[in-house]
């Protein structure tokens, strides 16, 4: 290893590689990423304390990039011999400070001195060097691309919206990338009209966060100018008075309150909006939300309205409601279609975009003593009443079977999600799993935002141990954890929409960073309806949407 004596200190400058070779390994460590040192020590114990570390640094560190980084530049200057520190100060234009290292560091931070700094360390452009030879045939990469089937769906949706009644639904199964596809539509729309506003509506925090984050990611690749992004949900307060160009991501509840308290302001906003998107389109005909959509989308005749959904119906057995939803969107719908395949779900599974789910039922006798009133309420309600769900959550026999199923699944799956029938049940089941030695997390509508975010981040992590996520009411939509390969649906529902959404949390395929197969366990309680096949669920409403208006 060279020493100061091996370098001609009278020669001008100091080669960057020579300076590195003068440093001791413990100083070189400060210049290299910790994860690299950990990997190398894992492969070769003691590597990070050996002289070979210097050559690793010489081969890895780019001189120009290293000298541009404030922290690394400070480390490099601190490695210099005193005589060379003084020479650098002189080259950069001053030698007034008592400490040449501090003076050199200060002078090196000035942008106008950077070329001289590079020259001092031997980093120069050689004008005689031949230009890089580019190949005749090359590929241009894309930062926010779409698969073939997504591009086709986007084109057909644009065509649908361009014609009267300028509204319709984009129908893609969970995991097929409907949010990404829709963001391409938003990007194209904003690029074509300037200035203009797009409003993206959704009901829960996960969907809203996902939309805002996805827009920032997509517009960086698709955009042609700087635009605004307004977040309006929960405790967020934004003034939309001067919103003219960009995307407004808003909670449906927040917009309903906006209409109630400031209808004139909403009407004024509608004058500037040219595209409205509602995620989970089946909510569009709820009276409160429908009023908001009508206000935003009908003020101007050319305003476009797009619904996004994996399940374009509200119920599984109420054709009247499904008809109403179809009518609201002008009976216009683009369904993800792939030539030569009977349905898109089968294709997406075969090609690895979706995991192939294996459905099982877990039959339980909850021991509920349902009265005649309970039975009537169950038969008439849109979904299973909350009181019944709470009682199911207190069933010992039911909970024992769910815990046993969880312990069985974690023996072969790293990420398992459980849809519990109540908040209390989710907390209890999680506590039992932790007591029995399995990491378990809880997310419910009562969770504090920071606790929810922390739990979700942990569940999505690359930790190699099995983790079970128990939740109630918040992770059915907008929650994307591709590693999830098993789900227990312990929350009975009469809604095919809700059931399909729960199944979708565990069906991300290999091409989406997920799994080849997934396991879906549906807890079946006596007297309560269950569902089984996601492909059947996806095609359930086709007869309603294919009927022509009279």
Image: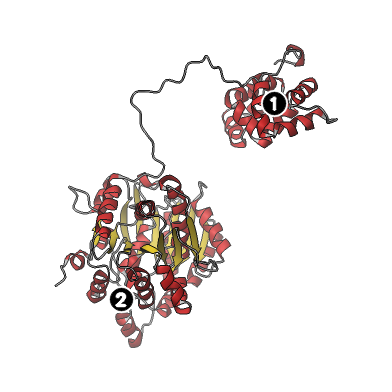
Whether residue 349 sits left or right of residue 116 in the image: it is left
How many marks are shown on the rendered structure? 2
Q: Toward the viewer: 264 or 284?
A: 264
- Which secondary structure lies at badge 1? helix
Q: Toward the viewer: 436 or 230?
A: 230
- Residue 201 x, y percent position in the rendering: 41, 65
- Most extreme residue toward the right is 98
Find residue 160 and report its image quarter.
bottom left
Whether residue 79 sits left or right of residue 355 in the image: it is right
- Residue 208 x, y percent position in the rendering: 45, 62
Find residue 396 and report its image quarter.
bottom left
Reply above or below: 15 against 361: above
Q: Nearer the viewer, mark 2 or mark 1?
A: 1
Reply above or below: 264 against 202: below
- Which secondary structure lies at badge 2? loop
Residue 158 visible, this orientation: yes
Residue 403 visible, this orientation: no
Whether residue 303 sits left or right of residue 58 in the image: it is left
The numbered mark at residue 527 is 2
Q: CA distance from mark 2 to mark 1?
A: 71 Å
| Residue topped by disc 1 | 25
């Amino acid at each position: 290893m060279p020493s100061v004596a091996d370098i001609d200190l009278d020669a001008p400058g100091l080669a960057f590689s020579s300076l590195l070779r003068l440093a001791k390994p413990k100083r070189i460590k400060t210049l290299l990423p910790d994860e690299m040192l950990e990997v190398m020590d894992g492969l070769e114990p003691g590597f990070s304390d050996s002289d070979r570390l210097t050559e690793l640094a010489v081969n890895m560190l780019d001189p120009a990039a290293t000298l541009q980084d404030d922290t690394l530049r400070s480390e490099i200057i601190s490695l210099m011999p005193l005589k060379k520190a003084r020479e650098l100060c002189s080259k950069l234009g001053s030698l007034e400070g008592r400490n040449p290292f501090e003076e050199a560091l200060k002078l090196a931070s000035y942008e106008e001195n950077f070329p001289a700094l590079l020259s001092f360390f031997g980093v120069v452009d050689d004008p005689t060097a031949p230009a890089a030879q580019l190949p005749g045939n090359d590929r241009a990469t894309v930062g926010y691309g779409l698969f073939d089937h997504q591009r086709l769906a986007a084109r057909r949706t644009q065509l649908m919206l361009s014609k009267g009644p300028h509204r319709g639904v984009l129908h893609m199964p969970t995991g097929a990338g409907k949010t990404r596809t829709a963001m391409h539509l938003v990007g194209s729309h904003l690029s074509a009209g300037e200035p203009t506003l797009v409003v993206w509506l959704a009901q829960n925090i996960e969907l809203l966060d996902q939309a805002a984050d996805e827009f920032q990611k997509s517009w960086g690749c698709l955009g042609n100018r700087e635009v605004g992004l307004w977040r309006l949900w929960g405790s967020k307060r934004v003034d939309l008075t001067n919103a003219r160009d960009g995307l407004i991501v808003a909670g449906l509840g927040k917009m309903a309150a906006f209409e109630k308290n400031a209808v004139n302001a909403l009407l004024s906003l509608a004058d500037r909006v040219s595209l409205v998107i509602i995620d989970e389109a089946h909510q569009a005909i709820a009276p409160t939300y429908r009023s908001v959509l009508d206000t935003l989308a009908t003020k101007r005749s050319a305003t476009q309205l797009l619904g996004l959904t994996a399940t374009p119906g509200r119920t599984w057995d109420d054709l009247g409601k499904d008809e109403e939803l179809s009518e609201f969107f002008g009976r216009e719908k683009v369904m993800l279609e792939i030539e030569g395949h009977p349905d898109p779900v089968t294709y997406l599974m075969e090609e690895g975009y979706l995991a192939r789910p294996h459905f099982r039922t877990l039959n339980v006798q909850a021991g509920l003593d349902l009265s005649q009133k309970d039975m009537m309420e169950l038969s008439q309600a849109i979904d299973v009443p909350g009181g019944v769900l709470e009682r199911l959550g207190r069933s010992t026999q039911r909970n024992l079977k769910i815990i046993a199923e969880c312990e069985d699944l974690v023996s072969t799956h790293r990420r398992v999600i459980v849809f519990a029938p109540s908040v209390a049940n989710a907390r209890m089941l999680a506590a039992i799993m932790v007591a029995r030695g399995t990491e378990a997390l809880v997310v419910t509508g009562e969770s504090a935002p920071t606790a929810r975010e922390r739990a979700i981040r942990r569940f999505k992590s690359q930790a190699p141990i099995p983790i079970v996520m128990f939740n109630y009411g918040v992770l059915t939509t907008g929650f994307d954890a591709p590693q999830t390969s098993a789900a227990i649906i312990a929350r009975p529902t009469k809604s095919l929409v809700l059931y399909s959404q729960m199944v979708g949390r565990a069906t991300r395929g290999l091409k989406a960073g997920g799994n080849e197969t997934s396991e879906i366990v549906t807890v079946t309680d006596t007297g309560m309806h269950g569902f089984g096949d996601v492909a059947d669920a996806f095609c359930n409403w086709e007869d309603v949407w294919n009927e022509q208006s009279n």
